[in-house]
Image: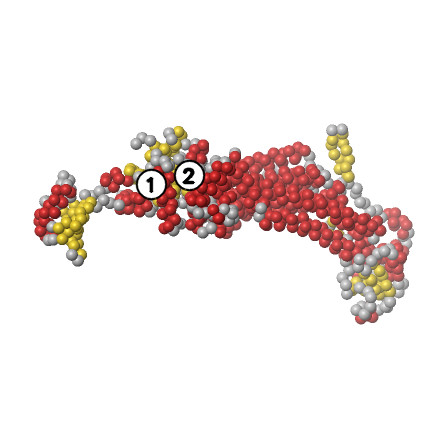
């Protein structure tokens, strides 16, 4: 056991001392922070731009005039409607000489032919601005139609119902049931990020194991070492040593990011809160379906320490499972170019887990999600995606036990291939051959 | 003669498509240099890996100092494999410490012994350099040091001279003999026969996964001698030939400038002494010596003999 400890130490220290490790460890959170800052900057800068729309209204009753109420109703909005020209051609020809970004053309009878309306621009309106214009126009036409059919707008308003389901989760506890508010949107983000991170970590450190084993084989050091330690000890020492490297990096990142995010939150949060309160349309500036304020909420809605704990468990479990397979591949091949045919079947389940991640997000308690969070090859990613939405304890237990069983099995499998593979030189290996290696004695 | 440091009995190792070792038994006498010979692919390396417990035999038994071979013997064996290398990015000193500790030395012991060997091999300035900065020969020296550092009772060198220049090869040869004089037993695997005669006391020849020859170098050469003698002289070849008793045959004759050479076959019961007396009476003898086959000749003869069967 003392020897495996020596191997772990070497694997750990040589990697942690490398320049690339130090650079990545420092740069990681800085990149993350920069990304985060960029999100906020993009969101804020977008809010600051005014969009002036020249209304060219050719309808006899001047339906477009109703847009003036928008200007009055939303004095803080960056969307402004202006009037000057009576024909589209005039407005079009002077758009580059005057201060307006686009032209809204209203045809003769927009109520009968709403498709005749269009927006011509020199500066593309943001999606939210376009949405706002559309909503205003729809309202105007709606009003006209109500008049046409002689319906009282008050009646119509009371008929129209918008349903927005408020979600809460009922949880079973020892003292009965308890309700908990769902922050679905935020949970999607946490799910997605943790699933991706597990994927990246498993792949990144798994490949390090592969490279490490290949280095030992191609350097011809492996026979020197296995005359002192069992091949299994060498393999496990490497796998565990690299796992520690991964954990070290992860924990440094957690601490760093914690500090950086706290600082940034303090700096930007009041700003954002103002915008939210002012109720202006632009605070909905979105980035990948997530609004800026909710990034900050993320850290409040999820139980961070549980998430980190589960992350570490599923990273370690998934890593041990995959890295032993990577070690087996590394031992069997002579050069990186041979690795492709063996790499694919191993990375497939990883890529598959990410691919079904979307369906799991849509229905975190569905049968698909359940099945793949039990299968050890996919459970690290799929389960991490599910955890923010709450997973029953028995499911976690089954998944965890299967994962542990899974890596015990793959480690056993890998060890048998490894001990033969590391001593084989200059031979192209096939699956048939690997199968035979499994059954060699000792 | 019964003191064997290592015994392997009826070792069989099969792989999917071939048998690497077929009923091979070896007894390694203590304190000797034992040559494990054979052409490439004969099974030498498999045998050596089995001795080092890197792989397990399918059949057969192994004994170290008459105890069944076990993992606790690893620290008493030193192994320099044919396929050998080092971690290129590691520092020389750290690397040597790592390998020494894997062999079971404490940090302190390892440091002390490394100081001694690094001095001896003039490597001291290199302690903090990376392995990749060393020349090939220096890397081989480091490898040799870590093989012998823990003072193993049994040392196994697989093709130790490959990769060394003649000067360093000589240095290593000297060290091997010194280790022997200090009591270590050495298994020495090679297909280069010239070094065998110089170093080995005992050999086993493996060909096509079977042992085909085993014994002390002297005995084997005696066993394979063909009663051939080479005579160099001045005088009349014809006269001499007529004087030789029947039974003695001339295998080869050759003349250069002023000297004649004959290769004679002297079958028992005739002795070389009797024949030499006759020769001296007829011609002016310059030299007369027995043609003992070299290990190289025996090796080739044996290996070919088998393959012609």
- Helix, strand or loop at label 2? It is strand
Looking at the rendered structure, whether the residues under marks 2 and 1 are on a common chain is answered as: yes
What residue is rendered at 88% in x and 61% in y? A65
Q: Earlier in the sequence, mark 2 or mark 1?
A: 1
Image coords of residue A368 (percent x, y): 65, 41
Q: Position of residue B306 (x, y in %)?
A: 28, 43
Residue denoted by label 1:
B35
Pointer 1 local density, CA inside 10 Å: few below 14, some 14–19, many at least 20: many
- State the residue at coordinates (51%, 47%): B128
Q: Which residue occupies 74% across, 47% down? A: A263
Q: Residues within 10 Å of mark 2 (few under 14, many from 20)?
A: many
- Residue that appears at 52% across and 37% down: A4
Q: Is residue A92 visible?
A: no
Q: Secondary structure at mark 1?
A: strand
Residue B147 horizontal/vertical position (percent): 43, 41
Judged left or right of residue A261, residue A314 is left
Quarter of the C terminus of chain A within the rendering: top left
Q: Chain of mark 1?
A: B
Q: Is residue A372 above or below residue B253?
A: above
Q: Which residue does the numbered mark 2 point to in the structure image?
A: B78
Between residue A101 and residue B101, name the one nearer to us.
B101
In the image, residue A51 sits, relative to residue A363, either above or below, namely below
Residue A360: x and y in percent read 67, 43
Numbered label tally: 2
Between A177 and B95, the one nearer to me in the picture? B95
Of A428 and B301, the residue lying toward us: B301
Horizontal side of A122 relative to A255 (left or right) equals right
- Which numbered dot is residue B219? none
């Amino acid at each position: 056991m003392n020897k495996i400890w020596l191997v772990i130490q070497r694997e750990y220290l040589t990697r942690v001392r490398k320049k690339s490790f130090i650079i990545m460890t420092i740069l990681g959170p800085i990149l993350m922070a920069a990304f985060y800052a960029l999100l906020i900057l993009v969101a804020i800068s977008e809010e600051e731009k005014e969009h002036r729309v020249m209304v060219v209204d050719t309808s006899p009753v001047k339906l477009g005039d109703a847009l003036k109420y928008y200007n009055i109703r939303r004095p803080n909005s960056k969307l402004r409607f202006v009037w000057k020209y009576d024909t589209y051609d005039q407005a079009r020809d002077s758009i580059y000489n005057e201060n307006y970004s686009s032209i809204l053309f209203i045809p003769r009878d927009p109520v009968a032919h709403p498709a005749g309306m269009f927006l011509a621009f020199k500066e593309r309106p943001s999606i939210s601005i376009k949405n706002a214009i559309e909503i205003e126009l729809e309202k105007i036409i709606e009003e006209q139609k109500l008049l046409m059919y002689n319906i009282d707008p008050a009646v119509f308003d009371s008929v129209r119902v918008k349903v927005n389901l408020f979600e809460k989760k009922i949880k079973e506890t020892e003292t009965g049931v308890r309700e908990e508010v769902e922050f679905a949107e935020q949970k999607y983000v946490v799910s997605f990020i943790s699933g991706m991170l597990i994927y990246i970590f498993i792949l990144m450190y798994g490949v390090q194991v592969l490279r490490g084993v290949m280095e030992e084989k191609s350097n011809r050091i492996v026979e020197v070492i296995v005359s002192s330690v069992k091949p299994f000890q060498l393999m496990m020492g490497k796998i565990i040593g690299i796992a520690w490297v991964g954990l070290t990096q992860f924990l440094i990142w957690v601490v760093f990011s914690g500090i950086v995010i706290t600082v940034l939150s303090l700096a930007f949060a009041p700003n954002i809160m103002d915008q939210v309160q002012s109720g202006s349309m632009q605070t909905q500036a979105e980035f990948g379906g997530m609004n800026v304020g909710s990034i900050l909420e993320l850290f409040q809605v999820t139980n961070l320490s549980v998430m980190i704990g589960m992350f570490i468990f599923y990273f370690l479990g998934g890593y041990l499972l995959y890295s032993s397979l990577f070690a087996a591949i590394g031992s069997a091949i002579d050069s990186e170019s041979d690795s492709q045919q063996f790499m694919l079947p191993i990375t497939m389940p990883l890529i598959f887990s990410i691919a079904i991640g979307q369906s799991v997000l849509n229905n975190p308690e569905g049968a698909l999600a359940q099945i793949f969070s039990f299968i050890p090859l996919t459970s690290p990613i799929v389960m991490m995606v599910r955890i923010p939405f709450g997973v029953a304890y028995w499911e976690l237990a089954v998944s965890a036990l299967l994962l542990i069983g899974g890596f015990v099995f793959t480690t056993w499998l890998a060890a048998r291939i490894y001990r033969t593979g590391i001593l084989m030189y200059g031979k192209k290996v096939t699956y048939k051959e690997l199968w035979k290696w499994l059954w060699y004695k000792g | 003669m019964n003191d064997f440091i290592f015994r392997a009995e009826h070792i069989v190792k099969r792989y999917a498509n071939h048998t690497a070792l077929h009923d091979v038994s070896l007894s390694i006498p203590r304190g000797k240099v034992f040559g494990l010979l054979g052409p490439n692919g004969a099974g030498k390396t498999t045998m050596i890996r089995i001795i080092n417990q890197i792989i397990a035999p399918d059949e057969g038994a192994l004994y170290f100092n008459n105890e069944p071979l076990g993992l606790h013997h690893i620290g008493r064996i030193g192994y320099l494999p044919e396929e050998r290398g080092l971690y290129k990015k590691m520092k020389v000193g750290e690397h040597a410490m790592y390998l020494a500790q894997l062999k079971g030395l404490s940090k302190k012991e390892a440091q002390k012994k490394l100081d001694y060997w690094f001095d001896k091999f003039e490597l001291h300035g290199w302690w903090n350099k990376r392995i990749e900065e060393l020349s090939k020969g220096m890397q081989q020296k480091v490898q040799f040091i870590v093989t012998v550092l823990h003072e193993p009772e049994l040392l196994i060198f697989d093709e130790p001279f490959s990769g060394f220049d003649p000067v360093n090869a000589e240095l290593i040869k000297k060290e091997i003999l010194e280790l022997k004089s200090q009591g270590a037993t050495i298994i020495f695997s090679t297909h280069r026969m010239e070094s065998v005669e110089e170093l080995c006391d005992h050999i086993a020849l493996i060909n096509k996964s079977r042992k085909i020859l085993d014994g002390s170098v002297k005995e084997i050469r005696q066993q394979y001698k063909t009663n051939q003698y080479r005579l160099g002289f001045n005088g009349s070849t014809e006269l001499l030939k007529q004087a030789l008793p029947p039974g003695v045959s001339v295998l080869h004759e050759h003349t250069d400038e002023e000297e004649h050479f004959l290769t004679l076959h002297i079958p028992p019961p005739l002795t070389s002494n009797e024949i030499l007396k006759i020769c001296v009476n007829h011609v002016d003898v310059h030299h007369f010596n027995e043609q003992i086959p070299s290990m190289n000749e025996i090796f080739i003869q044996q290996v070919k003999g088998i393959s012609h069967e």
